[in-house]
Image (cartoon, grey):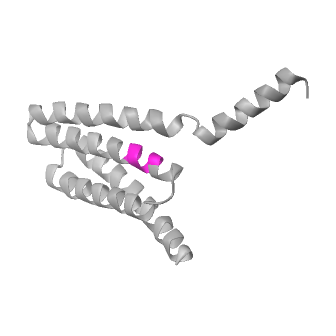
Amino acid sequence: MKQAARFSRRVVDPVNSVAWFAMDGLWLAELAWPAYVATGLTLLTGATLLALDRRAGQRMNDDLALNAWMWMNALWAISDLGGFPHVRRIALGVGLVGAVLLLNAIRPANRRRKNLHRFRKMRVAGR
């Protein structure tokens, strides 16, 4: 079962990257409907990555931040291509949530802090 999940991630992750690249490229080319299709595929594969890593700890934090970035980018594209300026404000809010998730993903875990604290104690005690 574990190997099947790894295989799935090995397939879904590159598909997500290609879809995201296509979304941005089609957005840049101002091809609205193909960009919307690529946007849907990007968000679907991003959600699939979350489902595949729902118990993976740090990877889950990374995927949450990445999904927030995808949603921010997708909403921005929809705002720009569809002429919906209010959606851009929603994208900004999602971006702020993503920034918080990113900070959470890069901060040291409690376990590492405890280990560092133990080493600091050893250094002070002269061990």
Task: Work out whether residue 93 or residue 69 is closer to the camera in this orientation and state it.
Answer: 93
Quadrant for residue 123, please give it. Answer: top right
Quadrant for residue 53, please give it. Answer: bottom left
Q: Is residue 62 above or below residue 76?
A: below
Where does the image place residue 8, in percent across and percent down from the top left? 46, 71
Q: Is residue 76 left or right of residue 87?
A: right
Reply yes or no: does residue 49 show up in magenta. Answer: no
Q: Residue at x 67, y 36 (%)?
A: 114
Task: Work out whether residue 69 or residue 55 is closer to the camera in this orientation and state it.
Answer: 55
Q: Residue at x 19, y 53 (%)?
A: 36
Q: Residue furthest right?
A: 127
Q: Is residue 15 left or right of residue 120?
A: left
Q: Is residue 85 above or below residue 24?
A: above
Most prominent secondary structure in the magenta stretch?
helix
Q: Which residues are magenta?
A: 61-66
Where does the image place residue 10, in percent across and percent down from the top left? 50, 66
The mark tally for this picture is 0
Task: Work out whether residue 15 or residue 86 is closer to the camera in this orientation and state it.
Answer: 86
Q: Residue at x 35, y 48 (%)?
A: 67
Position of the C terminus by quadrant = top right
Q: Residue furthest top?
A: 124
Where does the image place residue 115, in percent across and percent down from the top left? 71, 37
Q: Residue at x 33, y 58 (%)?
A: 47
